[in-house]
Image: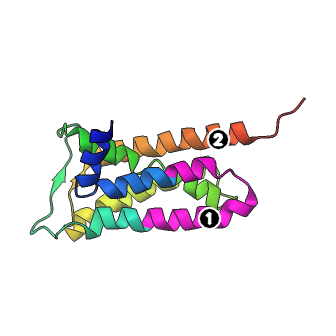
Amino acid sequence: MLNSILDIVYNHNGLLILIHLALTALLMFSGLERENRIYQRIILVIWLVGTAYLVFFERSPLMDARYNFIPFRDDNLFNIKSNVLIFVPFVPALCGAFRKVSPKAAVISGFLVIIAIELIQLVSHRGICDIDDLLENGLGVLIGTGFYLLMRKLSAPKED
């Protein structure tokens, strides 16, 4: 287990993925109370900045647009895991930071953010516009939604 964690950390973006996981844990255990909203907004901003860095600024611009519209062409397990994990915090962060955002609206927002990222990558030539990213990031949004709904249910006051 420790060797796996060290392998992730030594990877060029592994540390940021670990930070994303830590943010997810903070969101899950910070509760849904109003007084934690400022912390959850800070976590959301950190997540947005970290994701933008990973997706756009860590990469060198490519000479031409690159894209992949064939699903599951890449079987790199690290890429698959990191694509899923990077979006797990999105729905808990958005719903936790803004009380009026419903989980359904957060899921739709998550998918819109994912589509926007892929289109920006295609146009800016930073990264590859990849159908796998859409599917794997979308799975991360759904997993994060499940975590959020579970934590909301567990933290709800019990009725006798």
State the mark number for residue 39. 1
Verify CB contact (< 8 Å) between mark 1 and mark 2.
no
Give coordinates of residue 65: x percent, y percent. 15, 63
List the residue tagged with mark 2.
151
Instruction: Write the residue at 19% across / 36% down.
Output: 75
- Asked whether residue 156 appears in the rendered view, the answer is yes
| Residue situated in front as seen by the camera: 91 or 114 | 91
Q: Where on the picture, by quarter, is residue 66?
A: bottom left
Q: Residue sitting at 41 percent across and 40 percent down? A: 139
The answer to whether residue 158 is left or right of residue 104 is right
Residue ranking furthest to the front: 2
Apparent side of residue 48 relative to residue 150 in the rendered image (left or right): left
Q: CA distance from mark 1 to mark 2?
A: 17 Å
| Residue 140 badge | none
> How are the colours assigned in the image?
rainbow
Q: Amino acid at mark 2?
A: Met
Count of numbered marks: 2
SS for callout 1: helix
Helix, strand or loop for the magenta stretch, by majority:
helix
Residue shown at the point (27%, 70%) measured from the top left = 57
Residue 134 shows up from this direction: no
Name the residue furthest top.
160
**Residue range of the region highlighted in magenta in the rendering:** 24-48
Q: Nearer the viewer, residue 113 or 148?
A: 148
User: Is 54 part of what is drawn in magenta?
Assistant: no
Instruction: Give the vertical position of 45 relative to 13 (above or below).
Output: below
Q: Looking at numbered disc 1 in the image, what kind of residue is underneath it? A: Tyr
Query: Which type of secondary structure does the marked residue at label 2 adopt?
Result: helix
- Location of the C terminus by quadrant is top right
In which quadrant of the rendered image does the N terminus lie? top left
In this picture, residue 6 sits left or right of residue 48: left
